[in-house]
Image (cartoon, grey):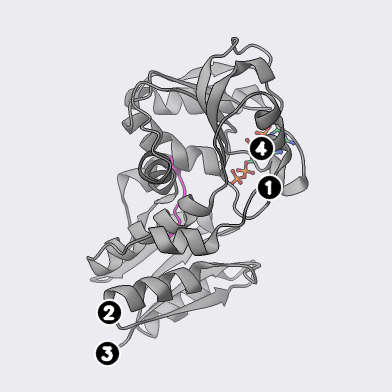
Amino acid sequence: MTDRYAVFGNPLSHSKSPLIHMTFARDTGADIDYGRVEAPLDGFAASVEAFRAAGGRGINITAPFKLDAYALATRRMPRAECAGATNCLKFENNEIIAENFDGIGLVRDIERNLRMPLAGKRVLLLGAGGAARGALLPILEALPSILTIVNRTRAKADAMQCQFARFGAIHVANGDEVGPRSFDVVLNATSASLRGELPAFAAESIAPGALAYELAYGKGLTPFLTFTRSAGAGPLADGVGMLVEQAAEAFAWWRGTRPRTRSLIDDLTIPLE
Ligand code: ATR
């Protein structure tokens, strides 16, 4: 019997999720159907319940429903719990189980695809919203030598530092406080690029050849990537690898088989130049 999955969001017109999951299904021989549900802004829970009642096995969740999905869950896995948000639900034995694969997808992309192990590296994370919260635990688990958070609203970064203190040491700084050449990896987890804006931080904090990673996918050379490149960053990346890797984690969680990701990442990559 065909197992049904879907991505929920609003708007959804540009979602690559159906393409990604149907490619995984083809490659692993899984009999699934993966649709898209543009739920009304005030009707997420009812839409999910209808999908579940019709035999749906699981869903991915994108903006603006990651918090609603978290609230709907009857059980939350540790990464979802830490992020306070979920991008993936599994329906099993009358339970709605919540996971968050965004951070693990990011770390897998950096470490395996971009070949930059984070252990011992100095990492700067820009932002303290949902995307940053989703990334934080997997980054700490990768054991960087230092993790500094810079956020426009300092109080939000301070709160995140307190909340995550039991998982590892986190520094919080203002953008102009970070020291010269202090970071090997700079991650933009703010939503500034969606409006063509640059999150403020000191250019000299970037070590020569540092990895600059824009979590948003498909925005081209964002102000962040342009700024970091002119400040001496080496490899530049956008979130295409993260997108595919988090989907692979979700697929494996639902189906028990982890699909290959390399050729799909290559297919979806839009050159940054
Ligand atoms: P998301 O789920 O995409 O993370 P969010 O939870 O609304 O969205 O968080 C947006 C993040 O981007 C926040 O850290 C925000 O900074 P503030 O906490 O100061 O609002 C950050 N952000 C958005 N626009 C920005 C800009 N122009 N410069 C710097 N930071 C920005």
Contact, mark 2 vs mark 1 (Cβ under 8 Å)? no
What's the magenta bit mostly, secondary-structure-wise? loop
- Element assignment for label 4: helix
Residue 254, how many percent across, how many down? 29, 67
Label 3 CB-ligand 1 distance < 8 A: no
Please give left or right for residue 194 compared with residue 252 in the image. Answer: right
Residue 177 position (above or below residue 48) = above
Disc 1 marks a residue whose amino acid type is Glu
Q: Which residue is mark 2?
A: 29
The disc, 3 or 2, on the residue closer to the chain's N-terminal end is 3
Q: Which residue is mark 4?
A: 225
Please give left or right for residue 23 compared with residue 189 in the image. Answer: left
Q: Which residue is mark 1?
A: 273
Q: Which residue is mark 3?
A: 1
| Residue nearest the viewer, comparing 257 with 63 | 257
Mark 4 to mark 1 CA distance (whole Å) = 10 Å
Residue 33 is a magenta residue = no
At a point 65% along the width and 15% down the height, the residue shown is: 204
Mark 4 to mark 2 CA distance (whole Å) = 38 Å
Contact, mark 3 vs mark 1 (Cβ under 8 Å)? no
The disc, 4 or 1, on the residue closer to the chain's N-terminal end is 4
User: Can residue 3 be seen at all in this image of the molecule?
Assistant: yes
At a point 71% along the width and 40% down the height, the residue shown is: 192
Mark 2: few, some, or many residues within 10 Å (few <14, many ≥20)?
A: few
Stretch of the chain drawn in magenta:
83-88
Rendered-image quadrant of the N terminus = bottom left
User: Can residue 74 be seen at all in this image of the molecule?
Assistant: no
Disc 4 marks a residue whose amino acid type is Leu
